[in-house]
Image: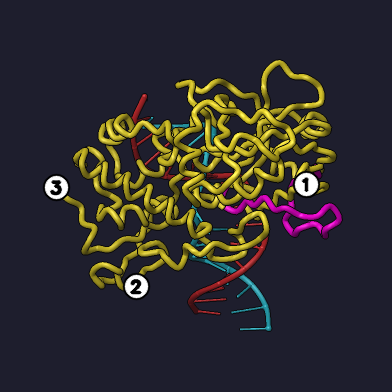
Chain colours: A yellow, B red, C cyan
DNA sequence: CACACACCCTGTTTGC
DNA sequence: TGCAAACAGGGTGTGT
């Protein structure tokens, strides 16, 4: 469930269950779901079993679980999960029937729930898991969001984001871990991913400077996870619609003021989607309990081709874009010459 | 270095 | 009904 809100819904659902959980069994049903893992799957399984999961952390669309292996390791490890286009992590009982399309099965002993199965389900296998080394963050700030509650769901979570710059959960029972739990190490394979717009360490002036220095269309830039992370095709289209910016508007033609407006709309859209539990069109995009979010009812542009623009009534158009589509209002969102 | 594109996959939906 | 094509919210590697 690809974009930031959907991944955060999954992360928030997992955190209270996996904090302090001991891995008791791992089964790799499809090797392709380990494509991000360096080394054989035996190594993945052997090092996971007996170890303890510390928390659930997210940056952009990447999710990871700081991990203490049974055999001491020189540096902190993390179990990384990327959901790709169709990945899910579902909480199941230990004796549940295997989910269809389940690729990896983790059985854990959770301090809060007891024996639980984490089912990594992925239709297209663009997602994957991996056990990865971690590296310190370049800016020394927390690597991602690790609170026990859904980011943006209430004032507590907001406060946790603001306050949590250096806390790391110190308890292992998962019941009273620091609500502002952030860590300052990031999995190696996530280190090149930029901070997302909801991250307190997001450096907006710098991102805007880099954005305006690009020579490409603004939507391509929004989707570049090395510039800012968490935004995918849905929320790019929604943010551009909200800011009245054409997806192919050249980045170098944007003023700083318009770029600020655009990033503000990105945040509004992401937070609104979080508040509604993410966007779901079908059973493919669900929380850890298999339930759907409601943001699809709030979409103004994405998938709305032919329907009236909620602002001006002009039919939304859909255009081919990078093997996908862009959806926008041809009247509200024109390429501007400044 | 920055950019554009091909590619990795499978299941469901759509159209003939 | 049956079949093929179109479609799907991702990242990465490669070539320019």
> Can you tell which mark lies on residue A337?
3
Q: Indicate which disc, 3 or 1, sits on the residue closer to the N terminus.
A: 1
Mark 2 or 3 closer to N-term? 2
**Image position, residue A199 (x, y; %):** 44, 37
Q: Residue at x 75, y 59 (%)?
A: A100
Whether residue A213 is situated above or below residue A270 in the rendered picture: above
Residues at discs 1 and 2 both on one chain: yes
Report if residue A17 lies within the magenta region: no
Say which residue appears at 77% left-offset and 49% top-offset. A113
Give the label on residue A306, or none: 2
From the image, tell me which residue sits under label 1: A105
Q: Is residue A164 above or below residue A156?
A: above
Start-end of magenta stretch: A84-108
For residue A169, side relative to residue A198 (left or right): right
Outermost residue on the left side: it is A338
Horizontally, is A104 left or right of A165 in the view?
A: right
- Which residue does the image show at 37% across and 51% down from the upper left? A268
Mark 3 residue crowding within 10 angstroms, few (<14) / some (14–19) / many (20+): few
Between marks 1 and 2, how big is the CA–CA gap?
42 Å
Q: Earlier in the sequence, mark 1 or mark 2?
A: 1
| Residue under disc 2 on the same chain as residue under disc 3 | yes
For label 2, the SS is loop
Q: CA distance from mark 3 to mark 1?
A: 53 Å
Q: Quadrant of residue A35?
A: top right
Q: Secondary structure at mark 3?
A: loop
> Whole-percent x and y of residue A302?
40, 62
């Amino acid at each position: 469930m690809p974009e930031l809100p959907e991944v955060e819904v999954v992360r928030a659902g997992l955190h209270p269950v996996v904090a302090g959980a001991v891995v008791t069994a791992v089964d790799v049903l499809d090797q392709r779901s380990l494509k991000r893992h360096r080394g054989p799957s035996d190594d993945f399984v052997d090092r996971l079993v007996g170890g303890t999961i510390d928390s659930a952390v997210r940056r952009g669309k990447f999710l990871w679980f700081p991990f203490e292996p049974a055999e001491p390791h020189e540096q902190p490890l993390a179990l990384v999960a990327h959901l790709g286009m169709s990945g899910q992590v579902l909480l199941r009982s230990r004796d549940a029937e295997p989910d269809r399309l389940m690729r990896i099965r983790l059985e854990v002993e959770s301090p809060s729930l007891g024996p639980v199965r984490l089912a990594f389900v992925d239709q297209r296998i663009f997602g994957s898991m991996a056990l990865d080394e971690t590296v310190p963050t370049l800016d020394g700030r927390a690597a991602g969001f690790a609170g026990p509650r859904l980011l943006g769901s209430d004032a507590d979570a907001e406060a946790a984001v603001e306050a949590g710059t250096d806390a790391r959960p110190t308890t292992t029972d998962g019941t009273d871990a620091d609500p502002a739990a952030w860590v300052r190490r990031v999995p190696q394979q996530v280190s090149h991913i930029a901070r997302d717009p909801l991250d307190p360490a997001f450096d907006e002036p710098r991102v805007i400077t880099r954005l305006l220095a690009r020579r490409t269309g603004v939507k391509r830039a929004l989707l570049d996870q090395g510039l800012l992370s968490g935004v995918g095709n849905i929320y790019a289209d929604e943010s551009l619609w909200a800011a009245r910016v054409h997806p192919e508007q050249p980045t170098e033609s944007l003023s700083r003021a318009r770029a600020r407006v655009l990033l503000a709309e990105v945040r509004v859209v992401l937070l609104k989607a979080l508040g509604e539990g993410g966007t779901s069109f079908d059973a493919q995009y669900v929380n850890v309990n298999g339930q759907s979010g409601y943001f699809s009812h709030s979409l103004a542009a994405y998938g709305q081709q032919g329907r009236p623009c909620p602002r001006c009534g002009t039919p939304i158009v859909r255009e081919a874009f990078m093997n996908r589509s862009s959806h926008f209002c041809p009247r509200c969102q024109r390429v501007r010459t400044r």
